[in-house]
Amino acid sequence: MNVTYIGPFWDSTGYCDAASKTTLCIQKAGYAIQAKTVKLTGQRVDAYPDIQKLELVRHKPDVVIQNYLPPLMVYHAGAKNIGYFFCETSHFRPSNWQYNLNLMDEVWVCCDQNVEAARYSGVTKPIKKVPIPYVNPYAKVVDRMDFGFPEETFVFFNVGDFSYRKNIMGLVEAYFLSFTKYDNVALILKCYCDGQPTQKSVEIIKNEINNLKRQLKKHNVDIYPPIYLVADYLDEVELQRFHNAGDCFISLERGAAWNLPCYQAMGEGKPVIVTGAGGQLEYLIGEKEGVTLLDGETEFVKNMAQCPYPGLYTCHEKWFNPSIQHAVFAMQHAYRNGKVRHDRTTWLSKWDLAGCTSKFKEILG
């Protein structure tokens, strides 16, 4: 069977990450595969070396997989057409995505939440749940980013853009309510403001953090615990160094189709504290050590006016708002528990390329 996989392989997006890793898994499963790239954003990154080789392949496809936003999907005659997409909310009915998805022969999503959202939004074609494999395409990096804090400092860390959905300020609030500068703790954020240059992102985020300090007024003097901010783009190797600098990944994201930074943290053996709803449940449910799922409540989507795609993130959809109080409890517990690691070997056996190969053979047939 010949497969053509179309995705944003040269973009700095979650879609790029998913397309690259899924393509490599399909190749490992024994299928002849060709990679074709499309653009989603203006920020270019180098595609994985193995993906660049697959872009040189030429064949007549039996299956065409389109892994990007549904409005860009078109039907390719003479092949089975599969649309693979992600969403972070309870449905996407106002977006009209269902029209393009119903042009496909089959629809792929990554989690149960997306299955439900697609069906509720009016997708009538067969829907299959397809995992995103865990892949490290480069050699293992053993060093860590140096932020200047002592080796014994307990470090929480997060990766995500500075949006209401990612809820970075909810995380910062929980951190401030949990500790003071007299605790041997730090928080490092890999964070940026979409569409803003690095220095402007830093200014915006620092201003929001300072505003939060004034709103909380927890102390008459500034004895809040330290935050380290990285707003520059990090490639795969640098991102792994960033993860190696942390001791516990934490995310209060309101809506996630997969939560790739959490996924990478699990692959590195780091404990995680994350929202107890969304795509991350696919690979966290059943893990007995090093995983804390935060309570919260469902709420209507808001504060996403900057989203450039019409019909997305309106007040009609819902997502899950995690509890700040539970996050405070979880962070303090992790700090008291010290630097521990979960069993990454067992976890990787289910989610790496080898572990996911049989799933793709079953899915593709």
Image: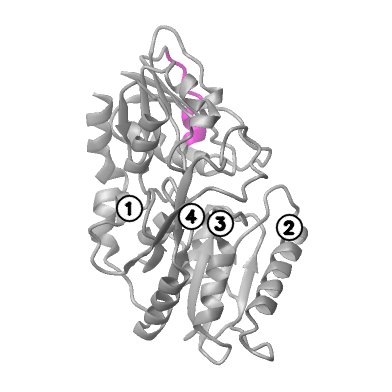
Disc 4 marks which amino acid? Answer: Arg
Disc with the residue nearer the chain's start (1 vs 4): 4
Looking at the rendered structure, the secondary structure element under dot 1 is: helix
Question: Mark 3, mark 2: which one is toward the viewer?
Answer: 3
Name the amino acid, label 2: Thr
Q: Which residues are magenta?
A: 51-59
Q: Residues within 10 Å of mark 3 (few under 14, many from 20)?
A: some
Alpha carbon distance from label 3 to label 2: 14 Å
Q: Is residue 53 shown in magenta?
A: yes
Side of 206 where 270 appears, left or right: left
Q: Nearer the viewer, mark 2 or mark 4?
A: 4
Query: Quadrant location of residue 288?
Result: bottom left
Q: Is residue 271 visible from the viewing direction of this image?
A: yes
Q: Magenta stretch: residue 4 in it?
A: no
Instruction: Judge whether residue 241 can be spotted in this image.
Output: no
Residue picked out by circle 3: 160
Indicate which disc residue 254 carries. Answer: 4
First reached walking from the N terminus: tag 4 or tag 3: 3
